[in-house]
Image: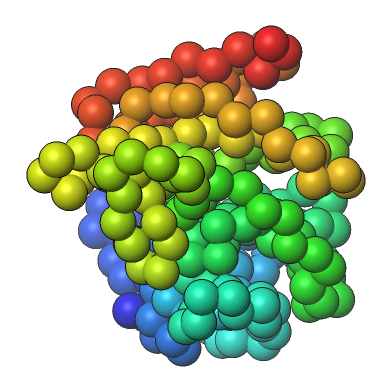
Amino acid sequence: TGFVVGGGGGPTHEVLQELVLPGGTSGAGIVVDADGGVWLSNAQSEIQRASAKDGKFDWDRKITVPKPKIGGHAYPCGMQIVGDRLIVALSRSNSVGVANWKTGTFEKELPVHVAPFSVAVEADGKTAWASCWGGPQPKEGLMQASSGSMVSVDARGVVKAASVVRLDLTTGAIQPVEVALQPMQMVLHPDGKRMFVAHGNADEVSVIDRKA
């Protein structure tokens, strides 16, 4: 598991290189920085960078994220780069991490809802959105543990809550939006007002008012 470098032209689109990612690949997470480096989140607690030299990619840097209080690995997933900062969803930590990709340092961790999968960051770098598969941690009703965190479930034991969380990257304040199940990738519309969220377990797309 890792990433594949493909040919940019020609009819065959041949594979030029395959690079194995230490720690295995997570469910999502690949971004390219301003220097042309490729960052991938692994299935443990690291984000690895590969860069090209003499036409070949190799690993040259990594960011280590904190492990969750529940034990095991953080399982970093979706990421976005804005300026020098790399914003990443830390699935098993129920948080969003902020790192400096140029220095390779992890800066801070901000709690959101259960099992964040992807992030979308506003252009000013002050606000991020996180799609959370487990929704808020339940305080009552039917619930069960999922990868170390409690989630709301129905009578069949299937997760029944999900959310998209608006996160202030300075203060850590959150504003949750209840959405359909398994929110995955998010896209911010250039109009500055709307956001589109794809749902893997609901076969629909949500439209969220970012200014509400």
Residue 19 in view (yes/no): no
| Residue 50 picture location, percent across and down | 60, 78
- Compare residues 142 and 171 and report the one nearer the observer: 142
- Would you identify the image quadrant in which residue 103 lies? bottom right
Residue visible at 62% across and 57% down in the picture: 95
Q: Where, quadrant-wise, is the N terminus in this rendering?
A: bottom left
| Residue 78 picture location, percent across and down | 52, 54
| Residue 104 picture location, percent across and down | 78, 77
In this rendering, position of residue 91 left or right of residue 175: left
- Compare residues 212 and 128 and report the one nearer the observer: 212
* 202 versus 66 height, above or below: above
Residue visible at 47% across and 25% down in the picture: 178
- Would you identify the image quadrant in which residue 58 lies? bottom right
In this rendering, position of residue 79 left or right of residue 15: right
Residue visible at 56% across and 65% down in the picture: 93
Residue visible at 51% across and 75% down in the picture: 70
